[in-house]
């Protein structure tokens, strides 16, 4: 088994095509992403997000005070709040969705420019009418958030609302237990608010364009499935002379496949490791999470990608070209859905058919990176990690079962 492992390591290293798709192409694409997106967020950073707040006496609501006090690390205001009625707020939200292609539409533009434009026309500009979310303050329903999309900024708002509601419920339950319990609860909330404001809401990296780099690593993991398909098909009896010899020999087919699997995994981890070194220390891309957890996520993604290639390689007696077409449809289609070509598409799928994001390998990988950045190693990341592990086992087992079912009239 060790000899087979070493042989396939050498075989893949000598393959220029394998090294190009596993390492060179992702590095080149990552460089292009860096020059395309590195300066965009810098122009938006620390600009207040526009939100509409509705409700009776909303200006004096405790949650409004929380929103007004939220700041970025440089001390600038995080929120630009508009107090309007609900009909106007929903209209502003619709305008924000229509203008979402222009990322600057949901942030404060130059106040002087907006004021000048308003003075000329006598009415507000389109940009001042756009908001990324509507917050409804109601005495009975409490604090609710209305959004039309589900990207990073809406996640920040959702985190703020969720944290506030949890603390409000905690205080309400404590108040029912007596004045002393309420005072203790108030002290706990006061001590925790600073941490939640600075870390829990916005995450370590608020740049939405980092999602493209999440997709880049996910694509590297899925490119491993293409290499896996090529390697595993090359040892099938109906495809190559090598496969005929292996099939006629007394070598355990499962042991042979496991040796190839481990060789593929080793090469993929080396390639993705080099890519991460290039992206993080060299280009300075901030993935927004613990480096060890990023490596663990990459490891799980590579295992899942190789398992996918292994499973497809054992589908029936199709030719390599047909199996490659099937795998290409899965990886390219999955890449599109996960936001590789347009980050917003993943949010649309999440709203319309979330089950697709739960089973699409690339979406699962990107969601794991996103969770590390925004929420840390919490429940959402654990769900993504367990999904990757589960899909790895499922795909490999299906591949083994399909391989055992394949029968050949003669070798």
Image: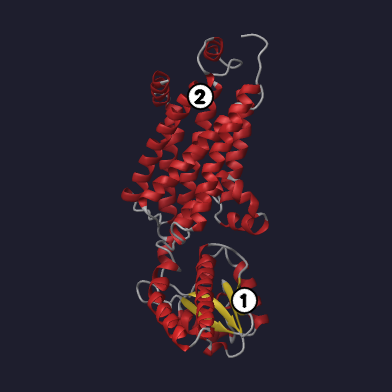
x then y, percent, for residue 283: 34, 50
From what the image shows, is residue 383 above or below residue 18? below
Residue 346 seen by the camera: yes
- Residue at image point 47% right, 29% down: 261
Residue 324 seen by the camera: no
Residue 257 got which mark?
2
From what the image shows, is residue 84 above or below residue 271? below
From what the image shows, is residue 9 above or below residue 154? above
x then y, percent, for residue 355: 64, 51
The answer to which of marks 1 and 2 sits earlier in the sequence is 1
* Quarter placement of the C terminus: top right
Q: Which residue is more in the foreground, 51 or 258?
A: 258
Please identify the quarter of the rendering in which residue 233 is found: top right
- Give the structural element (helix, strand or loop) at label 2: helix
Left or right, residue 291 beside residue 346: left
x then y, percent, for residue 399: 59, 29
Q: Which residue is mark 1?
A: 92
């Amino acid at each position: 088994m060790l000899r087979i492992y070493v042989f396939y390591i050498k075989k893949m290293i000598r393959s220029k095509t394998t090294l190009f798709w596993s390492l060179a192409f992702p590095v080149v694409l990552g460089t292009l992403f860096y020059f395309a997106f590195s300066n965009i967020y810098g122009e938006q950073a620390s600009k207040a997000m526009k939100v509409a707040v509705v409700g009776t006496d909303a200006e004096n609501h405790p949650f409004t005070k929380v929103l007004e006090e939220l700041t970025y690390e440089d001390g600038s205001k995080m929120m630009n709040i508009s107090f309007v009625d609900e009909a106007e707020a929903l209209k502003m939200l619709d305008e924000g969705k229509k203008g979402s292609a222009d990322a600057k539409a949901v942030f404060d533009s130059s106040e002087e420019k907006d004021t000048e434009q308003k003075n000329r026309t006598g009415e507000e500009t389109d940009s001042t009418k756009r908001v990324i979310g509507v917050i409804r303050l109601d005495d009975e329903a409490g604090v609710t958030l209305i959004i039309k999309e589900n990207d990073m900024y809406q996640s920040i708002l959702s985190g703020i609302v969720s944290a506030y509601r949890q603390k409000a419920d905690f205080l309400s339950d404590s108040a029912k237990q007596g004045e002393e319990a309420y005072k203790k609860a108030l002290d706990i909330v006061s001590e925790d608010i600073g941490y939640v404001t600075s870390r829990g809401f916005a995450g370590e990296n608020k740049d939405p364009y980092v999602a493209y780099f999440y997709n880049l690593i996910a694509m590297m993991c899925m490119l491993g499935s293409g290499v896996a398909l090529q390697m595993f098909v090359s040892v099938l009896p109906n495809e190559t002379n090598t496969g005929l010899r292996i099939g006629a020999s007394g070598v355990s087919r499962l042991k042979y496949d496991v040796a190839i699997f481990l060789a593929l995994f080793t090469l993929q981890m080396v390639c993705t490791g080099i890519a991460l070194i290039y992206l993080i220390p060299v280009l300075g891309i901030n993935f927004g999470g613990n480096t060890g957890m990023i490596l663990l996520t990459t490891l799980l993604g590579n295992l899942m990608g190789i398992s996918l290639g292994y499973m497809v390689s054992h589908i029936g007696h199709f030719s390599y070209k047909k199996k490659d077409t099937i795998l290409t449809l899965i990886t390219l289609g999955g890449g599109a859905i996960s936001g590789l070509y347009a980050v917003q598409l993943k949010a649309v799928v999440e709203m319309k058919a979330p089950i697709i994001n739960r089973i699409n390998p690339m979406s699962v990988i990107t969601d794991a990176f996103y969770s590390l950045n925004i929420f840390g190693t919490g429940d959402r990341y654990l769900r993504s990690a367990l999904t990757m592990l589960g899909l790895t086992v499922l795909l490999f087992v299906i591949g083994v079962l399909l391989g055992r079912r394949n029968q050949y009239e003669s070798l």
